[in-house]
Image (cartoon, grey):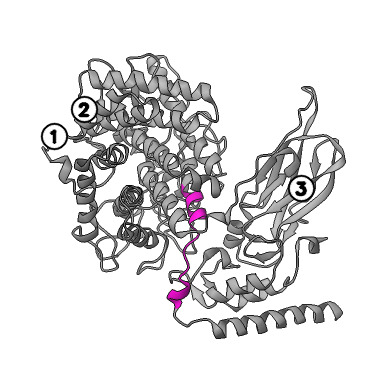
Amino acid sequence: MKKSGKYSGKVGIFFIMLALITSILPSNAEVFAASYDYSTALRYAIEFYDANKCGKDAVVDNIFDWRTGPCHITDGVDVGLDLTGGYHDAGDHVKFGLPQGYAASVMGWSIYEFRDVFDATGNTEKMLSQLKYFTDYFLRCHPNPTTFYYQFGDGIIDHQYWGAPELQVGDRPTLYVANPSNPATDVVGEAVAALALMYLNYKSTDSAYADKCLKAAKELYQLCKASPKIGDYQFFYQSTSMYDDLAWGAIWLYVAEKDQQYMTEAKEYALKKNINQEDPLKNKWTMCWDNMYLPVHLKIAELTGDPVFKTSVEFNLDYWLNTVDKTPAGLRVLHYWGVLRYAAAESMIAFLYNRVSPNQKYLDFAQSQMDYILGKNPANMSYEIGFGNRWSSFVHHRAAQGGQGYENNADKTPAKYVLRGALIGGPDKTDTFKESVDEYQYTEVAIDYNAAFVGALAGMAKHFGAQTSIKPSPTQTVSPKPSGENKYTITGYISLDFQVSSQSSQFIKEGFRVEIPNVGIYAQTNSNGYFELSGVPVSTIGHTIAISKKNFLKREIGKVVVTGNVQISNSTSPILMWIGDTNGDGAINMSDIMAYAMVFNSTSGDGKYKQDLDVNQDGAINMSDIITVAKHFSASTSSYN
């Protein structure tokens, strides 16, 4: 009874303070207009690419445990090469050249421009890992200076299969190759940009690898500009331009090498029309796999200040802000198929042009489109799968859907797995979304969809989010170790000290950072709360293990003696974590009450709601959340002991 009385007292104090604070807060919700957790949305969008990894190492550094093994491990065997790796295009398993290069270059551009955001939100390491998976593949596809292989698998044949990529057996044709007689300028130009950007993004991590990427980029640029020609393709990706891609490659070689010739050529190519003879200075489209004029013009405007290209970008943005079709709720609709990829791409453009010519209208536009995607829409759902508390269950993606074959409509049931981080196609011009695997334009996902979505989310985190939600880890000073020293593994499970649904439990258990600060070793928990710290040195005194996650009270476990492999907890007796430390100051106190007061009685989709403060992830911040937090009111890190 004594323990119960102490708990009741804490809850009472918490409620009294909450009531006092909420009573004096302005009633207008806009005063405290809250944003979504853009840092988490960004992390999910980057991690989506794990679901589409192809090749021998598909499950390496992969967050999705339902990707169970290697796939398509004989790609390139018909030409006597190992051309494995890269990413499946969408819900299918073909590796198409144009969207592969587009996705890699735009993602590389994203971290190049927003490196501060990626660092501050803890997303740099994973982003670079995904980019290296692209460029490792591109380097394999470039066995000599005048060759680049760029499509694996026949789209027509591939689309006759429904099931997991690991179970798709048999060799696939190496369908297309770029060489001097057929340079595939559009496809190769995108690869040039991706490789040059990898040089820029990776040279401080591994200069030798970065140099290899730059060398390949320069060779491929010479290949695709010598006698420009659009590459071969099946009808899935019919290119209408190539000089935009060539200019895109030239721009990034200029940034990498500061050779003025590249800039001269980029400007020349940037003004050449596509096969439809459309004026690139009056571009009403946006950045996508078939149109890179806009990002090219933006970068030239930024790097040179040339008013011709500034006017071009401003013409495009003005069209998007004022003329392009929009839904009743304000979503811009460029094309009926995969409408959200275009809204996300234009949002990224708006963020980056705002640096060249600052104007609040560009930021407001981007925010309106991105918040629509994340849940501020008539359906009150997130079009980023796994973000928020409601999303489509009929994503058009074979591996995530989980069915095998077409018999008994196995391909049409709700997805067995959560394809977290995927940007789904989205609604139509009436804000209507159709929940069906067969409605491709609504429910398809693809690597090109997510590419600019990543960049736009970085822009949202920078301008409208709390970048400190995941603080960058300080550089650790690690003492040199004898080369023969034994290293061991520490494993365990982490869980919550409150009850939630099984789906929410998996969501919340994932992403706890578990680290040994003094040796710089860390890991993250999976959806079961499991973690594994590898390469741990011997310690007879004992290591200290720190456990942290946004909104949870940090916990330290000291004196973990390591003379062999150690399991410090199991699934039936896990390490429990307390929720409620909203600002990471090591205590659940008055500042946390303030944070909850500002969002109390909010629901998903309105301006005040913050997903990370929704304790049970039920889409509402209400009394049940307050009761859970109040259990540990006035606790600090030392209270765990």
Amino acid at dot 3: Ile
Circle 3 — which element?
strand
Asked if the residue at tag 1 contacts the one at tag 2, i.e. Cβ–Cβ closer than 8 Å, the answer is yes
| Highlighted magenta segment, given as a residue range | 29-45
Residue 43, magenta (yes or no): yes
Quadrant, the C terminus? bottom right
Q: Residue 178 carries which label?
A: none
Q: Can residue 594 be seen in this view?
A: yes
Asked if the residue at tag 2 contacts the one at tag 3, i.e. Cβ–Cβ closer than 8 Å, the answer is no
Q: Residue 341: x percent and y percent?
A: 33, 50
Of residues 469 and 391, the one nearer the viewer is 469
Quadrant, the N terminus? bottom right
Q: Residue 63: x percent and y percent?
A: 56, 44
Of residues 372 and 466, the one nearer the viewer is 466
Circle 1 — which element?
loop
Residue occupied by mark 3: 545
Q: Is residue 152 visible?
A: no
Asked if the residue at tag 1 contacts the one at tag 3, i.e. Cβ–Cβ closer than 8 Å, the answer is no
Amino acid at dot 1: Ile
Disc 3 or 2, which lies upstream in sequence? 2
Q: How crowded is mark 2: few (under 14 residues within 10 Å), some or many (20 or more)?
A: many
Amino acid at dot 2: Ile
Residue at point 63% right, 75% down?
A: 626
Whole-number angstrom distance, CA of label 2 to CA of label 1: 10 Å
Q: Which mark is residue 275?
A: 1
Residue depth check, mark 3 versus mark 2: number of the one nearer the observer: 3
Q: Which mark is residue 230?
A: 2
Q: Residue 570: x percent and y percent?
A: 76, 51
